[in-house]
Amino acid sequence: MREFVVLGTASQVPTRTRNHNGYVLLWDGEGLLFDPGEGTQRQMIQAGVSASQITRICVTHVHGDHCFGLPGVLSRMALDRVEHPIHLHYPASGEDMIRALVAVASPGVDLRLHPHGGPGPVAEGVEVRSLLHRIETYGYRVVEPEGRSLLPERLAAAGITGSDISLLQRDGRLGGVRLEDVSVPRPAQSFAFVMDTAPCDGAGELANGVDLLVAESTFSDDDGDLAAQYRHLTAGQAGALAATAEAGMLILTHFSSRYPDVGLLAEQARARSGAASVMAANDLDRVPFPKRQRWL
C-alpha cells in the first residue's frame, strides 16, 4: 500500500484550520514521517495514523515548524511500546537542536540518529539533495527498485501457471524460459519532498520524473519579493518545478497564514505546471499514490 497522508499544511504560523507541518508517506510497509511540527501527535490521531506505523522520520531542517513535534511523537511511540527501530534523518548542522528535542522525549524508543552533511543516499531507496534556504536544508526523494511486469499472454504461451510464476520471479529463469521473455521493464515509482527553499538545482534533481511531488508553496506569485527574501517558493515556482521535472502530480503545502483561501495559489501553480496535476493540500487529506509515470 502506498499513500500520502497530510497532517499539517501551515508554515511558520498555524491557523484555526491549518496545523504546523507534518506528513506521512506509507510505502510498502514503511511509514516515513516528514517534518513533524508542533501538534503532529494529535494530527496523527485525527488522520488515523498510529505511532507503530512510523519507521523513519525525515527532517528537512531545524526551523521549529518542521521539528518541534518530535518530542511528542517519540513520547507517544514510547507510550505505545513501539518495538521496531525508528531511524531519524536530519542535517548534521542541526545536531544540537535534534539532540535537545529527543532528550525531552519519554525514554523507551529504539531511536537511531542519522545526520547527513551532503547530498546522496541516506537509506535504502531514500536520498537527499541540498536546498537553498536560510539554514542548511535538504529535500528527500524515495524511489523503489526497478522491476518487471509480467505479461499474462506470454506466460500462457510459455505454459507457466500457478506457483511456477513465483519461482520464475524468484530465480529469473524456469526451464528454458527467462523472466525477460515473459515480462517488460517496470519503471520505478518515486516521490519527492521539497520543502523550504528558493529555486535551486537540488529541488530539480529531487523532483525529476517523480510520480508524486510535494512542494512548499508559501507565497503567492504576487508576493515574489517576500519569497525571494525568505528563500521560499511561490505557487508559480512550485508549478514550474513540476513542469520542468515532468512530475506526474504536484501537492502544494506550507502555506503562509496571509492566505485564508489557497485556491489562488493552486491556480497560479496550475498555470505553470505543464502536464502535472495540481492539488492544494488540506490538513488530514489522504492521497492514494498516483499511477506510474512512464512505461517502456
Image (spheres, grey):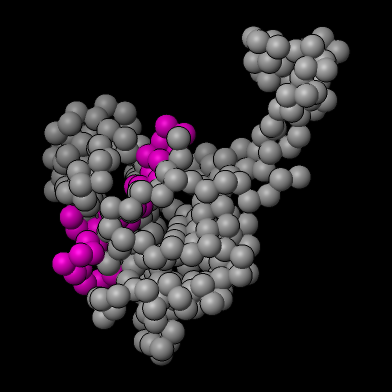
Point out the image quarter for the N terminus.
top left
Image-based side of 11 in relation to 1, left or right: left
* Residue appearing at x 32%, y 38% in the figure: 54
* Residue appearing at x 54%, y 42% in the figure: 125
Inspect the magenta stretch and tell me whether residue 27 lies in it.
yes
* Residue appearing at x 27%, y 40% in the figure: 49
Point out the image quarter for the C terminus.
top right
Provide residue 184's location: percent of width, then percent of height. Answer: 76, 34
Inspect the magenta stretch and tell me whether residue 2 lies in it.
no
Image-based side of 5 in relation to 268, left or right: left
Along the viewing direction, whichever of 258 and 138 lies nearer the viewer: 258
Type of secondary structure dominating the magenta stretch: loop
Tally the marks.
0
Along the viewing direction, whichever of 99 and 152 lies nearer the viewer: 152
Along the viewing direction, whichever of 271 and 177 lies nearer the viewer: 271
* Residue appearing at x 70%, y 12% in the figure: 161
Provide residue 239's location: percent of width, then percent of height. Answer: 52, 72
Residue 8 seen by the camera: yes
Provide residue 120's location: percent of width, then percent of height. Answer: 55, 53
Extreme-right residue of the structure: 176
Provide residue 261's location: percent of width, then percent of height. Answer: 30, 75
The picture quadrant where one finds residue 147 is top right
Image-based side of 137 in relation to 171, left or right: left
Image-based side of 41 in relation to 53, left or right: left
What is the magenta range? Answer: 11-39
Along the viewing direction, whichever of 66 and 239 lies nearer the viewer: 239
Residue 96 seen by the camera: no
